[in-house]
Amino acid sequence: MLQAGPALKVTVHLNQDTGSTQGFLYEDILRFLEKRGIDGATALRAHAGFGSHHRLHRGDSGDVNGRHLPMIIYFVDETEKVRGILPDLLTLVTDGLIEAHPTEILKNLTTAEKVLA
């Protein structure tokens, strides 16, 4: 379990429909993070957004733009662990933006009931 102290937070920005050899890239990234022992990750789909092409994509547009929504994947872990997987993550992400920020874990608790469920 991630302990209190210095850590590194990584954010991956990509599109929901970005494909990969296994399916969708965001799914591959989540599987990769799990296999590499990252303590947790969250994928969020935005309602709307645009990237470097400056084309607005909205979930309620009803056309192809509604399927090309931004996705954000966050994960936080020990700095050394994150730095160890970054080269492979950078290779895995074929389209998108990856950023990292130093952070500090203040508290991380998991109850036994949630772990066993």
Image (cartoon, rainbow, N blue to C red):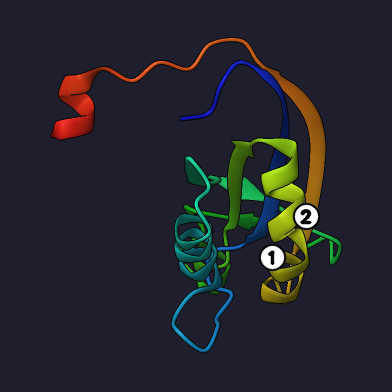
First in sequence, mark 1 or 2: give its number. Answer: 1
| Residue 116 x/y as whole percent | 15, 33
Within 10 Å of the Cα at label 2, are there few (<14), some (14-19), or many (20+) other Cα atoms?
Answer: some
On the rendered image, what quadrant is the C terminus found in? top left
Q: Nearer the viewer, residue 71 or 20?
A: 20
Question: For this view, does 31 lie left or right of residue 112?
Answer: right
Name the residue rendered at 26%, 17% in the picture.
Answer: 111
Q: Are marks 1 and 2 in contact (CB under 8 Å)?
A: yes
Residue beneath label 2, please?
98
Is 95 located above or below residue 34 in the figure? below
> What residue appears at the point 55 percent right and 45 percent down from the top-left corner?
46
In which quadrant of the rendered view does residue 57 lie?
Answer: bottom right
Please tell me whether residue 59 is drawn above or below residue 117 in the rendered image: below
Q: Is residue 96 left or right of residue 53?
A: left
Camera-side residue of 59 and 91 = 91
Tell me: 98 left or right of 58.
right
Q: Secondary structure at mark 2?
A: strand
Q: Is residue 115 above or below residue 50?
A: above
